[in-house]
Image: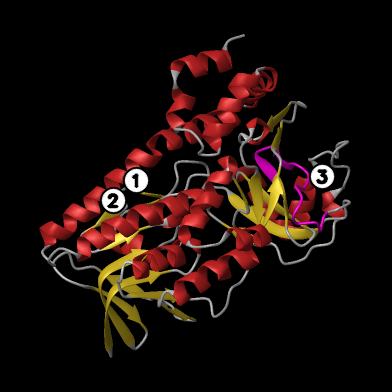
Amino acid sequence: MSTPVDVAVVGAGPAGTTLAAALARRGIEVLVLERAPAWQWRAGGVFTSPAAVRALERAGLGRDELDGLARPIPAMRLETPGGVLVRLTYGADRGGSPAVGFDRSRLDPALEAVARDRGVEIRRGVRVDAVELDPDGPATLRLGQESIRARIVVGADGSGSVVARAAGVARSARLAPRVGLTWHVMDPRPAAAETARPGPDARLAVIRDGYVGLAPVPGGRLNIGIVLGPSWRDGLARDGATATTRRALAMVPPSADDPIAWADATPCDRIAGAAPLGGRAIRRAGPGWFLVGDAAGFLDPFTGEGLHRALVSTELAAMAIQAALGRSDDRADRAVAADAYDRAMRRRFASKDAVSWLVQSFLARPRFFEYAARRLADRADVRATMSLVMGDLVPASRGLDPRFLAALLAP
């Protein structure tokens, strides 16, 4: 049995449902296919800058709804093994909006509800076994005994995207293999459940061959996200996630502002893992196919850009897909729209990717990272610029400006 549709989206995460809603608003028929029967916690980020909040408003979430999904966070505190503390405010200390910690168990279903309200058909519990791309005609998605014929197929299914593999563009990240582990614990600090007021700072503590992120989220909880490099691999395989995360958390010392020993906190859900962490795509679109969200490439969660990047990719893809469907089904015409999206993504994120690689190069050299962190801590203007660059609030090219780098690295 074969079902024809205009656009088939693989994956019902924030990128997939947001894109589907944007296309449905343009009058385009969209089918979303998701292998999970119901929403479940997966390894993913919850901390994001104010830019992501504005993108979610553009996606259709109201201000009141967002207030119930997010916990304002005054700043992210970057902590080094040498004891350097860098407080990144993302412009909140200069009159801007604060960063937030999202309750993904409510955010993701809210975006799915927006898509359904706009007429998108979302089929859960459906696994896409294979995608067959045809540059001269519709793509075919194989779902067991059924197949879907789509003029456009979109991969919104993460770094292991079945669409990216079918297009032959999926590649591993150019970093040493890492694993990401995330879960929530109860937050015993005073006023932890008061969602409307800003919570304590989030923390990003660099440890041996990894880092630990701690971000308050609604419901009196704290999200813990840990990224571990290759030296942790054997211990993780031998001892399991619980023992390994306790060892990693033991490397994060309590502070006067955050005296909790988080390794002993009560977990609210299971530890979810992702490995290998990150991935890349040598192209993000071609005749009849597009990649959005992490499927379009994701380097590392250190800069906290995952959700915002995913939302921006859906905005750019929606325009390109509308243009592609407005043309004939001629290969050359469809390629024009795909190339436009691929170029737009490269223009939008090339500088930010370079900044991310710069950060990673310092992380790989602890002595240099300590040096740069001390300069950020001591130089308010440099720190403010880096904060805005990491939060996608100013063009990332500012972080690559030779004058900025000189101000950062000069003794």
- Residue 187 in the figure: left or right of residue 32: right
Seen at 29% across and 48% down, the residue is 342
Type of amino acid at the residue the image marks with label 3? Ala
Query: Which residue is tagged 1?
Result: 345
Tell me the SS state at disc 1. Answer: helix
| Eye-nearest disc, 2 or 3 | 2
Q: Position of residue 328 (x, y in %)?
A: 12, 66
Cα separation, mark 2 vs mark 3, equals 44 Å
Quarter holding residue 98: top right
Q: Foreground residue, 304 or 361?
A: 304
Q: Identify residue type, mark 2.
A: Tyr
Residue 122 quadrant: bottom left
Where residue 376 sits in the image (x, y, percent)? 64, 22
- Mark 2 or mark 3, earlier in chain: 3
**Tags 1 and 2 in contact by the CB under 8 Å rule?**
yes
Indicate yes or no whether the magenta region holds residue 57: no
Q: Is residue 112 above or below residue 217?
A: below
Across and down, in percent, residue 144 comes to 37, 85
Residue position for label 3: 250
> Does residue 18 lie above or below 201 as drawn?
below
| CA distance separating discs 1 and 2 | 6 Å
Write the residue at 60% across / 44% down: 230
Which residue appears at 61% of the width and 37% of the height? 96
- For residue 57, the mark is none
The quadrant in which the C terminus is found is top right
Q: Viewer-proximal residue, 88 or 235?
A: 88
Assign a secondary structure to mark 2.
helix
Viewer-closest of 70 and 369: 70
Label 2: few (<14), some (14–19) or many (≥20) C-alpha neighbours in 10 Å: many
Is label 2 in contact with label 3 (beta carbons under 8 Å)? no
Q: Earlier in the sequence, mark 1 or mark 3?
A: 3
Region rendered in magenta: 192-212
